[in-house]
């Protein structure tokens, strides 16, 4: 895998050429930025900014996005900043405008075909596709237990996606003794060559037993069967070392800058 070429392909197709990630989401090119705009339960924010953006242009673009999302009445939106974005002090300018940075993640990519090998699950553990609201509830519960976060928004997103636009979306839950102990999702981005892995998490008592690796391999097999070349992950500090051992390569970092209190 030629890292620079893959990085350029990612920026061109997944960011500048971003597509809607839900049935009620639209993608807009607004001068030097590309943004996703949806409802209050959707992800709203900036996914790409021009590499030609200078200091004056950055300040103007930031102010324009605050005004735009403020007019929509969302409670918050995000500017997704990548380590190669310009100007070099864009993060400082976002903070000065009222954005709050959340923990950075590592942008990782791997050839999907290299990760399709079988992974044995512990006895009595099963991996199930999520296809309805009942499955989505189990998935949200696993997410809450793994990450200690409210799964309500995730539940709404998954139920809506399964009902209205399931073709390019995969959701999975791992069950043990009738309880959800791990879950994950995958977004397939037609025309890009990339499939995005999201939300992989396992409850504390089940970590280190192959569940996370099994979820990666299962999604890799689906992506490969559908003709996708690469898997992409925005990896936390917990999952990045695991993914690196599986063969993922770091392309840089990404930091969510969140603007809250949109009027």
Image (spheres, rainbow, N blue to C red):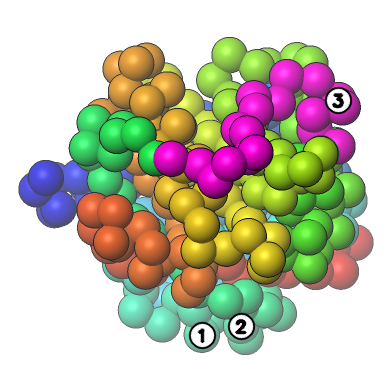
**Quarter holding the N terminus?**
top left
The residue at 34%/16% (across/down) is 225
- Classify mark 1: helix, strand or loop: helix
Q: Which residue appears at 70% of the width and 26% of the height?
A: 130
Instruction: Tell me, yes or no, whether the two marked residues, 2 and 1, touch with CB atoms within 8 Å.
Output: yes
Give the alpha-carbon distance from disc 2 to disc 3, as whole Å. Answer: 39 Å
Q: Which mark is residue 92?
A: 1
Q: Quadrant of residue 53?
A: bottom left
Q: CA distance from mark 3 to mark 1?
A: 42 Å
**Where is 232 relative to 83, above or below?**
above
Q: Residue furthest front?
A: 123
User: Disc 2 marks which residue?
Assistant: 95
> Which of the 4 image quadrants contains residue 246?
bottom left
In x, y percent, where is residue 155? Answer: 83, 39
Report if residue 262 is visible in the image: yes
Q: What x and y, as percent, mark residue 149?
A: 80, 64
Percent across and percent down for residue 57 are 45, 66
* 129 within the magenta span: yes
Q: Nearer the viewer, residue 220 or 157?
A: 220
Q: Depth check: 100 or 262 in front?
A: 100
Please give the count of numbered marks on the rendered protein: 3
First in sequence: mark 2 vs mark 3: 2
Q: Write down the region rendered in magenta.
A: 120-137
Of marks 2 and 3, the one in the foreground: 3
Tag 3 residue:
133
């Amino acid at each position: 895998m030629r890292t620079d070429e893959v990085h350029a392909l990612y920026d061109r197709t997944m960011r500048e050429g971003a597509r809607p990630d839900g049935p009620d989401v639209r993608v807009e090119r607004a001068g030097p930025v590309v943004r996703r705009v949806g409802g209050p339960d959707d992800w709203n924010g900036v996914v790409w900014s021009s590499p030609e953006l200078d200091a004056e242009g950055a300040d103007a673009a930031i102010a324009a996005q605050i005004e735009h999302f403020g007019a929509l009445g969302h409670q918050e939106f995000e500017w997704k900043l990548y380590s190669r974005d310009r100007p070099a002090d864009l993060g400082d300018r976002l903070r000065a405008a009222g954005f709050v940075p959340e923990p950075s993640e590592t942008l990782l990519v791997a050839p999907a075909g290299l990760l399709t090998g079988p992974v044995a699950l512990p006895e009595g553990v099963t991996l199930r596709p999520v296809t309805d609201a009942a499955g989505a509830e189990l998935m949200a519960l696993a997410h809450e237990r793994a990450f200690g976060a409210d799964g309500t928004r995730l539940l709404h997103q998954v139920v809506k996606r399964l009902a209205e636009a399931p073709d390019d979306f995969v959701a999975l839950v791992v069950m043990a003794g009738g309880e959800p102990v791990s879950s994950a999702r995958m977004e397939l981005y037609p025309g890009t060559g990339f499939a995005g892995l999201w939300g992989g998490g396992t409850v504390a008592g089940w970590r280190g037993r192959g569940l996370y690796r099994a979820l990666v391999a299962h999604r890799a097999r689906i992506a490969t069967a559908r003709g996708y070349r690469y898997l992409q992950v925005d990896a936390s500090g917990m999952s990045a070392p695991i993914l690196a051992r599986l063969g993922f390569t770091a392309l840089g970092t990404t930091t969510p800058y969140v603007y809250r209190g949109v009027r």
